[in-house]
Image (cartoon, grey):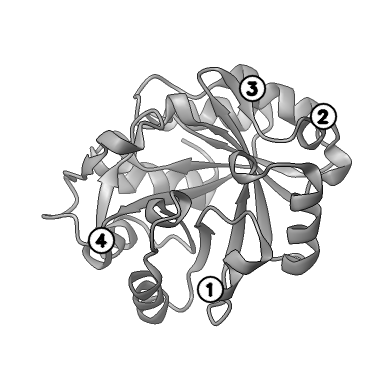
Amino acid sequence: MEIIPVIDLLDGQVVHAQRGDRQHYQPIQSLLCDGSEPLTISQALLELYPFDQLYIADLNAIQKRSNHQEIITNIKARYPHIQIWLDAGISRAIDLNAWQKLELNWVIGSESLRKLDDYLSLKKLCEENHVLSLDFAAQGYRGPSKLIKESAYWPDRVIAMTLSQVGSNSGPDSQILAQLINRSNGQKIYAAGGVRHIADIRQLEEVGASGALVASALHYGQITGDELNRLLNTNTV
């Protein structure tokens, strides 16, 4: 089971993402450290547990208004061993240009795609260094319909991103996750949105998830460093 901490960047700060309502996101108030400065938050997460992966959502880039290239470059420089999964609203080849000097795992979100061919073009450019995020809002799936129906198009890693659960402290959407796991053909499926505690992680593992993206539960002490050590080092809770 992989646990991947999430950092949401907006206007130079780490924010508390809640239910995909980006215009109302506020700076994070973490129990792990003071302030919401990205390098400080990154350090606090890695002091909690020596994660080897980090998911960064560049909310400015997703909303097509500048990006956090300098901040992400600094995080990568300070922690070169970390594999960064970057969600920057990539929908066209030109969107990759600003980031090509960094060794990143590109997150391609279905909500940013107009049609299946857009994804297939990006998939070819990114080769193995990408993750597909199948995005779900309160109204349902957001993206090209063929992309969710045909797992043959999926890469090795797929995120079940339930935006309406993000930061909600209401638990993962097990129904959507189970549907994608059943539809998959050997791909790793990662749950994103709503993880509250280790019991949720255990449940996700039982239904076949390969990992989970987690933010709020780490910052607010609902998942502790000791629990992470027991889960990830011995695979028992």
The amino acid pointed to by label 3 is Ile
User: Which of the two residues, 94 or 26, is positioned nearer the viewer here?
Assistant: 94
**Mark nearer the N terminus (3 vs 4):** 4
The amino acid pointed to by label 1 is Trp
SS of the residue under disc 4: loop
Q: Count numbered badges in the picture.
A: 4
Q: In the picture shown, does residue 208 fall above or below 39?
A: above
Which is closer to the viewer, label 2 or label 3?
2
**Mark nearer the N terminus (3 vs 1):** 1
Residue under circle 4? 12
Q: Is residue 185 visible?
A: no
Q: Quadrant of residue 217?
A: top left
User: Where does the image place residue 18, in percent across and percent down from the top left?
Assistant: 33, 31
**Mark nearer the N terminus (2 vs 3):** 2
How many neighbours does mark 3 have within 10 angstroms: few (below 14), some (14-19), or many (20 or more)?
some
| CA distance separating discs 2 and 3 | 13 Å
Residue pictured at 28% horizontal, 61% vertical: 47
Cβ atoms under marks 3 and 4 closer than 8 Å? no
Residue under circle 2? 149
SS of the residue under disc 3: helix
Q: In the picture shown, does residue 14 fall above or below 46?
A: above
User: Where does the image place residue 208, in percent across and percent down from the top left?
Assistant: 69, 31
| CA distance separating discs 2 and 1 | 30 Å
Residue under circle 3? 176
| CA distance separating discs 3 and 4 | 32 Å
Cβ atoms under marks 2 and 3 closer than 8 Å? no
127 on left or right of 231 = right
Residue under circle 1? 99
Residue pictured at 27% horizontal, 53% vertical: 14
